[in-house]
Amino acid sequence: MFRFWPYFFLIFFFLLQKEQIGFAQEQAKADSLVSVYDSLVRVYGSVQFEDELRLLDEIAISQSSPEDVIYYSNKLIERASKDSVGEFLVSGFLQKGNGYKLKGDYSEALESYFTSIELAQRFDQGEKIGAIYISIGDTYSNIKDYETSDYYYDQGIQEIRNLKDSLSLGKALLNTGDSYFYANNLQKAIQNFREAKEIFTSLNFELGIGYSLGNLGMVYSKQQKNDLARESLNEANEMLEKNEDFYAVSVYNLFLSDIDIEENNLEKALFHAQKSLNLAEKHKLKKETADASLKLFELHNKYGNRDSALFYHLKYIAVRDSIRNLEEIEKIAQETRKFEVSQKQKEVDLLNQIYNQKDRNQKIIIFSTAFALMLIGILAAVLYRKNSFIKKTNLIIEDERNKSDHLLKNILPVETVNELKEFGKVKAQRFDSVSVMFTDFKSFTIHAEHLSPEVLVQSLDYYFSYFDQIVEKYELEKIKTLGDSYMCASGLPFPQEDHAERIVLAALEMVDFVEKSKKIKDDQLIRFDMRVGISSGQVVAGVVGKKKFAYDIWGDTVNCASRMESNSEVGKINISEDTHQLILDKFYFSDRGEIYVKNKGNMKMYFVEGVR
C-alpha cells in the first residue's frame, strides 16, 4: 500500500491549486511540480495516466520560460492524443499557443489557439472557449491589430461571465486592460485593472493582485501621478519577484526608470533600466531587451559615458532590427492570416451548428474535422518553407548590413552613422565648446617633389596610423587629412568637459612619437619635423556630400587652429588664448605674447612645455 503514497500527495496538491488560465508565470510552483513528476517517474518508472496528464497540464500552465511552456505542452498533447482525452488536448494546445505568444511567434500561437477551439467544440469543453478567445485577443493586441483583438476580447469576456468563473474573469479583465493601455485608452484600462484587482483580492490570489497593481502603476505613470505609480509598481515587483515572475518585473522596472528620469534622479533611473535589461536578456524577451537597451543608451549618453552609450545603442539596433524583420514578415503575412482567420472562424461556426445537431450530422463533423486538420497540415508546411526562406534571406541581409555598418563607422562618427541610417540624412549641429588641432610636416612639398609616390605615401601612413591610435585613446574625433596635414577635434559628437586637456595630451604624444621616429633606421621611412596648432571655441559640424559622405566642421575656431599651426615652430604645440584659459592649471607654458596673424590681427599665443 505504501507504493501509492505519492499519488495521495498529488491529489492533495491539486486540491490546493486554482486553475491557471492565461497566467503562465508561477515558476516556483512549476519547479515544484517538475520535481514531483521527475521523482515519480524515477522511482516508479511511470505515473498513473490521468494523474500524469493533470500534472503536465499544471507544469505547462505554471512555466515562465516560453521554451519550457512549449516543451511541456507538446508532452501533454502527445500523452493525451494516445487515448483522445479531450480536456487535456484542449488545454495542451491552449498552453502551446501561450508559449509561442510569449516567444513572439504569433502565427504559430494563432494556429495553436484555433486548434484548441476546434477541439473544445469536438470534446464538449465549451467552458474553456472564453479563455482561448482572450488569448487570441492578446495575440492580435501584440501585433497592434486592436480592432480584431477587441472583437475576441468581447467574445471571451461574455463567455466567461456566463460561466460565473471569478478567477478567469479577473484574468480576462487584466489582459483586456493591458490591451487598452497600449492602445492609449487609459480610462477603460484603469477600469478593467481595478475590477480585476477587486476579484483577485477577494480570492486572495497574490499573483493576480501583483499584476493588477503593476498595470495600475503603468497607468498612473502615464497620468504623471508619480508617487502613486511608484508605490504600485514597487509593491507589484515585490509580489512578482516572490512568485518568480520576472517578465512583468522587467517591464515594470522600465516604468520606474521613466519616473526617475522625470524626477532627474539619473542614478536610480540607471539602476532600474539595468535591472530591466538583465531580466529581459535572461528570459529572452526581445521587445523588453530592445526597450531597456534604448533606455540605457539615453541615460549613459546623458551622463556623458560615450563608450557605454555606444554599446547599448548598438545592442538596441541589433534587437530592434530583428524585431523589425518580424514586423515585416507580419505585414507580408497579414492578408494571408486574415484569410486563414476568416476560414477558421467559419469552421468554428460550422462546428457550433454541428455541435447542436450532432446526432443528425455525425458524418459532417468527421468530414469537417478531417478537412480542418488537412488545412492545418498544409498551412504548417507552407509556413515552414516560408520561415526557412526568410531565415536564409535575413542572414544574407544581416551580413551585408554589418559590412556596410563597419565601413560607415570607419568614415563617420557612430552617432552620425545611426542618424544617417534612421533618417537618411544628418542635421548640422552647433557645439559651443570644442578644441580643434592641426598638425603639419615641415618641408613636405620638397620631399614630395623628389621621392617616389610609394615611399611618400608609406611614410605618411606610418605617422597617421599612429596618430589614429592616439586619437582613439583620448576619445577624439578624426576629421580628415589633407596632404601632410592631420586634423582632429575633441568634444564632439559627444560633449566633453575636459576636451582641451584631452587634445593637448594627444598632441604631446604625437610630437613625442615624431621625435622618437627620427632615431629609427629605415631607408623606406622619411623623417619629418612637425608643427602643431590648437584652438578652442564654437564650431558647426555636419555631413557634406551625397555620394561620398564626409564629416566636417566649420567656424572661426577651425580657422584659429589653422593659424596656430602655421605660426608654430618645429616640435612645438602652439595654442590660442581660448585654449590656454581652459587648461591653466594642467600644463606648463611659455608665453609668446601677441603675434600678428593675417586677417585676424594680433593674437596671444602660448607654447605647451609639459604636464604639471
Image (cartoon, rainbow, N blue to C red):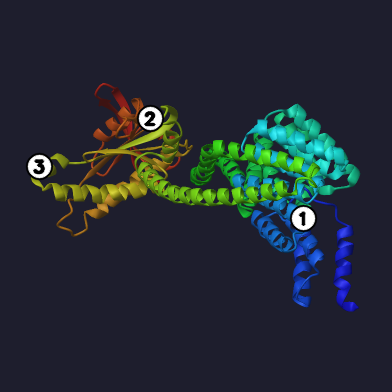
| Separation of residues labelled 1 and 2 (CA atoms) | 66 Å
Residue 142 in sight here: no
- Nearest to the eye among marks 1 and 2: give it: 1
Disc 1: which residue? 86
Q: Position of residue 215 (x, y in %)?
A: 75, 38
Disc 3: which residue? 449
At x 41%, y 30%, the residue is: 426
- For badge 3, the amino acid type reads Glu
189 vs 332, nearest the viewer: 332
Instruction: Tell me the crowding category of disc 2: few under 14, some 14 to 19, or many 20 or more residues within 10 angstroms, Cα based.
Output: some
- For badge 2, the amino acid type reads Gly
380 vs 268, nearest the viewer: 380
Mark closer to the chain start, 2 or 3: 3
Disc 2: which residue? 542
Q: Is residue 11 left or right of residue 329?
A: right
Instruction: Tell me the crowding category of disc 3: few under 14, some 14 to 19, or many 20 or more residues within 10 angstroms, Cα based.
Output: few
Determine whether the residue tagged by mark 3 lies in a helix, strand or loop: helix
| Separation of residues labelled 2 and 3 (CA atoms) | 35 Å
Mark closer to the chain start, 3 or 1: 1
Q: Are marks 3 and 1 in contact (CB under 8 Å)?
A: no
